[in-house]
Image (spheres, grey):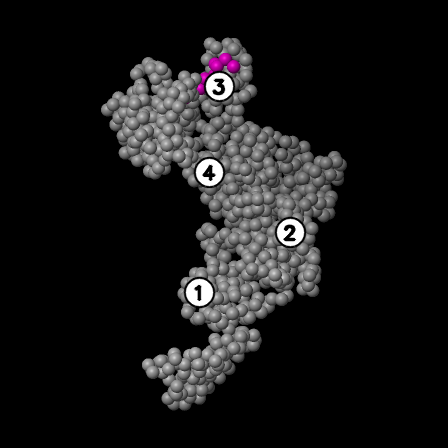
Amino acid sequence: MFMENKASDGEQPRVGVYVCYCGMNIASKVDVEALRQFAEKLPNVVVSRTYKFMCSDPGQELIAQDIKEQKLNRIVVASCSPLLHDATFRKACAKAGLNPFYFTMANIREQVSWVTANSAAATKKAKALVAAAVARVAMHEALEKKRVPVHADVMVVGAGISGIHAALLLANAGKKVYLVEREPSIGGHMGQLDKTFPTLDCSACILTPKMSEVKNHPNITLWTLSDVQEVSGFSGNFKVKVKRNPRFVKLELCVACGQCVEACVFKEGRVPDEYNIGLSKHKPIYMPFPQATPASVLIDPNACLKLSRGKCASKCVEACDRAAIDFEQKVEYSEVEVGAIILATGYQLFDATKMPEYGYGKYPNVYTMIELERLVNAAGPTQGEIVMRDGRKPKRVGIIHCVGSRDKRHHPYCSGVCCMVSLKMAHLMRERIDAEVFNFYIDMRTTLKGYEEFYDRVLHDGVNFVRGRVAEVTDWAMTPGEEGKLVIRVEDTLIGVVRRIPVDMVVLATAMEAHDDADDVRRKFNISCSKEGWFLERHPKLAPVSTFSDGIFLAGVCQGPKDIPESVAQAGAAAAEALSLVDKGFVEIEPNSAWIDADTCSGCKTCIPLCPYHAISRDEQKKVAVVNEALCKGCGTCVGACPSGSAQQKLFTDQQLHQEIEGVLNYV
Amino acid sequence: MSSLQIQVRIKHQEELDPDFANSIAALPGGENLSRCIQCGTCSSTCPVSLYMDYTPRRIIAMTRAGFKQEVLASNTIWLCASCYECTVDCPREIKVTDIMYALKRRAMEEKVYPKRFPTPVLAKEFFKSVLKTGRSNEGLTVTWMILKTAPLNMLKQMGLGLKLLLRGRMALGVEKMEGDPTQIRRLMEQVEVEEKKTH
């Protein structure tokens, strides 16, 4: 019988089994007392106990006491998932002087009580799992966690408000930070906004000081127009390759005087301005926006005659008395080593043309919210004057909430911020041009500090609220009053009647969505994302800024829709997590790495390309595969693939797995 | 089988009165009209909402949106018993009962009220009595109300009337205030003058 096998270390196993009630979580389905009695009779089991909460201090103390008094050398806890409490019980064993890897867990909560309807069946399944754990633990070996030193620098990817905040915190803590931004300037979406809710602070006024702080911080290396190309390594020791696109202007020389822009052979702007969402055009050589950081012009190589066709009078070069323009700049690659990475790559806005019923792109007076942000902004294309594409000033404005959000055909989630953005904009339209404003909403979501009060204020501003999802925006008039207007058709669900409301301007509060290339990015950094494309946190409650890849943290909207205060708070959390990693000086590595039995390895190289962490190489002298333990994540791919069974993994040896399987089958 | 009634129900913006909400909100008690979040507390707490064609919440929504015709023609405003439950319970401190009074007055001004319905008649008779005598003469007020709305009910109510008379709860005679009863009239006239000044 398998039970009579000697333990891995030659000692006679003395197993203690501890069955947890988990309050009623387990005990309501599994007959824990029967399970205890069953475990007691299993071979090698010396003691078997139940307890209300094994993870509590008294629960852990129970184990420690038995280890000492009953001379236990193997521990099995039948409770929740090892993800939750593996570390807890390992520590409890270690405290009592037992190597923590002489412990294993049987998951009878997530895998039994929570998912089994029938009580008898649940108890039976729990018994099988406990029998398996008892059989397996006999084969466990004493292992040691490895410590690997970490690199103290941190990389922050994305320089919107989240990235900026995280970078500044780390830099102020004395860490060297690489801040990578793909646009020509830092600032992100926040730099495009006019005012911020609910306090109506001017967005630029609170953002630009932080932008210039980034620029001037001795600990921050800022790379704009740059993209992360490749990430390798592991927590504490990442290697990152960054592609740096040419600006064609020497950053260190340019003072953003604008002489070159004046001198450009193009007299008018040619290229739709991204910062103004295409509401204005800029020349091939341009300043992204007045407060752009770094404060430097750049050249769009596709629009510039010199760069695209090779011939141009190059008036800009003549105009620049600092000789900052450099057509010869090429793409550069920089490779850096960092201990932690914070992803703050943000979001993009839903493309409103995907909902043709709202007429965006068809009717010139249908705007997206971000376009209106630029229109009302004093630094925007109209210097803050709210004039529509047809040159008129709107007297009546309809703001449509949830465009692309809460819609299974587009995005099932609530973008969270659009209600407040729409309320803020309604307020601005009342205040600035005294327009009559209608807000069309499904539910009003004003949940955070000061938001409901702001809603109350806007209600009292005299803004009209119609609860109902707009079906259509049309220019087809049914009545004389609708002639020449955009008509919004909506059910006023609170009154119970379908209404047609003619307006001059329609504003669409478009959803926040993950970047089109979010999937490429997450692959680069080897993290997961939700099905909507948001980067996935390790735990929604207890590890909200960590990812499943140790050492990579999330800040801001790339993890899911959020507003500025939430983004900043999360950026702070990510910075703290990164700091606690790089400041510690080392990382501990789970000793579940693979190893190759050099005596039986045939050197077939099957495992080498399969390893997702590039941890296996070939020893050309001995002609066998070798695992780099520092890189190995213990995924087991090589173990499964090895044709000769030479690849083995600690904590998952063949012996341990066979015993576990036999444990289950013997019971069943 | 009776044929289906089909009529146009859509509401065009031109059919609405853009000033209606403001005119009601400007009256005493109407100041928080715009702050309504349509929670429906007023409707669920109202003891007579079960008879109303529009619930009080909907009346507020329609008033705010300018549905003047529908609001003033609704039975809701006349069924309101002025118990003030809605006003007490409203989380936005909207004086719903006062708004109902404002709407009633407006309906009477615009002459779209149900003329034989007891509530407006009672209100008018009560006001008349006070104006004339300086006192609320219940016997007289009630008698006129019944005569003007449903005279045949006079017979039905005789028993109750007698009991009230015997127990001294109602008097048939006309009481007058001490002193000069025209004081009241002058007072009310002055109120009207002041009101006109503010509007």
3D distance between C-alphas at marks 4 and 2: 36 Å
3D distance between C-alphas at marks 3 and 2: 56 Å
The image shows residue A176, relative to residue A40, as above or below, that is below
Viewer-side residue, A452 vs A293: A452
Residue A74 visible, this orientation? yes
Contact, mark 4 vs mark 3 (Cβ under 8 Å): no
**First in residue order: circle 4 vs circle 2:** 2
Which residue corresponds to the image point at 48% horizontal and 66% vertical from the top-left? B51
- Looking at the rendered structure, the kind of residue marked 1 is Cys
- Looking at the rendered structure, the kind of residue marked 2 is Tyr
Q: Residue A424 vs residue A580: left or right?
A: right
Majority secondary structure of the magenta segment?
A: loop
Which residue in the protein does label 3 denote? A639
Residue A545 circle label: 4
Q: Which quarter of the image is occupied by the C terminus of chain A?
A: top left
Contact, mark 1 vs mark 2 (Cβ under 8 Å): no
Residue A358 circle label: 2
Q: Residues within 10 Å of mark 2 (few under 14, many from 20)?
A: many
- Give me the chain letter of mark 1: B
Q: Work out which residue is located at the far bottom of the displayed protein and give it.
A: B180
Residue A449 location in percent, x, y? 45, 52
Residue B46 circle label: 1
Numbered marks: total: 4
Residue A419 location in percent, x, y? 53, 52
- Looking at the rendered structure, the kind of residue marked 4 is Val
In the rendered structure, which segment of residues is drawn in magenta? A643-651
- Give me the chain letter of mark 3: A
Residue A323 location in percent, x, y? 66, 38
Q: Work out which residue is located at the far front of the displayed protein and give it.
A: B1
Question: Residues at marks 4 and 2, common chain?
Answer: yes
Which residue corresponds to the image point at 48% horizontal and 16% vertical from the top-left? A647
